[in-house]
Amino acid sequence: LKIFSGSSHPELAKAICEYNEIPLGASEIMKFSNENIMVRLLENVRGSDVFVVQTSCPPVNESIMEMLIMIDALHYASAERITAVLPYFPYVRSDKKDKPRISITARLIADLLETAGAHRVLTMDLHSPQIQGFFRIPIDQLIAAPLICDYFRAQDLSNTVLVAGDVGESKSIGRYANRLNIPIAIIDKRREGDDEKAKAVHLIGDVKGKDALIIDDEIASGGTLVEAVHFLQQHGVNKVSAAAVHPVLSGKAMDRIREVEIEELVVTDSIPLREKQQEYNKFKVLSV
Ligand code: R5P
């Protein structure tokens, strides 16, 4: 068994290697002056069971290309089985044709991974689980709920209500509610554009005087989270914490998050926090 890393999240790849007590596979990734990428494997992989770790984070498109080229290199080097490990799946939100004449890009990524030579895919908390159906090769979707619930179980949750920041999240919040055995509330939110602030319009459930724990699959622009915090405060919540699997934290996310009062913001290391983001002292990062 061998594990190789792309350049998106070497720390996670190293942590996985340490956990499995094997060295990280040696490779070099070069970018030429014409921006073409070359991946070279610096060890024999013939007949090996190989895992390639590459999460989706900036520069997103480059990391996809790098992943595909690495898989192709493994294929031509006669690796027996290649598993693409994508903790945060690229273009995960482009999963349907919800506007005329657009691409279903998450499906395109699935096609590209298969074409490059991946035999299996390992990913985490997909925005919509149906994305698994974009693949003909086996795909495993791991979920962070057990890890996140273990963390919160060590706290006093007797006055806590789990909050889904939008109706879409209300189904997966059940995973958390079942494990933690606490009530849930759901915010009905509406969004105009991608980086536009989402608007909360209704609240289903009782949060007055409670400690709210907002659960989401990802924080991207931060609009959903910040709107949820404001909305819960308007509804008389005692205090607010939040947990999200994937800290995408794009665009104005950090500026928005710093503006609201949050006790603790729990995320996983499916995506690395950039230096500026690490300065925010409310983050608690759980390792997947
Ligand atoms: C929405 O459907 C998801 O569950 C997340 O709430 C959403 O992706 C977060 O996006 P943003 O941070 O841009 O509001």
Image (cartoon, rainbow, N blue to C red):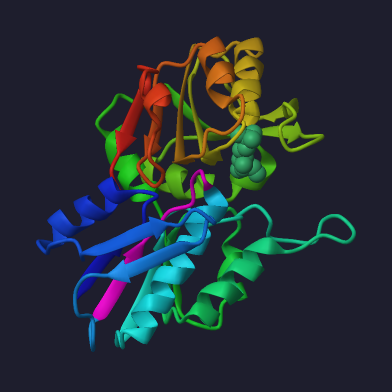
Q: Is residue 97 left or right of residue 179?
A: right
Q: Quadrant of the N terminus?
A: bottom left
> Which of the four quarters of the rendered structure image does ligand 1 lie in?
top right
Residue, far right? 100
Q: Is residue 144 above or below residue 203?
A: below
Towards the viewer: 215 or 3: 3
Residue, far front? 33
Q: Residue at x 40, y 18 (%)?
A: 280
Locate residue 2: give its quadrant: bottom left
Q: Residue at x 14, y 62 (%)?
A: 20
Q: Is residue 35 above or below residue 272?
A: below
> Horizontal and vertical percent for residue 246?
47, 43
> Horizontal and vertical percent for residue 212?
49, 23
Locate residue 72: give its quadrant: bottom left
Q: Is residue 56 found inside the magenta-colored segment of the image? A: yes
Towards the viewer: 206 or 203: 203
Q: Residue at x 21, y 64 (%)?
A: 26
Q: Is residue 159 above or below residue 287?
A: above
> Horizontal and vertical percent for residue 187?
67, 31
Q: Is residue 103 left or right of residue 57?
A: right
Towards the viewer: 46 or 146: 46
Q: Is residue 201 left or right of residue 48?
A: right
Locate residue 188: give its quadrant: top right
Q: Is residue 48 left or right of residue 284?
A: left
Observer able to see residue 158:
no
* Residue range (magenta): 49-59
Q: Is residue 45 above or below residue 229?
A: below
Q: Is residue 121 found inside the magenta-colored segment of the image? A: no
> Horizontal and vertical percent for residue 148?
35, 41
Towards the viewer: 76 or 235: 76
Observer able to see residue 173:
yes
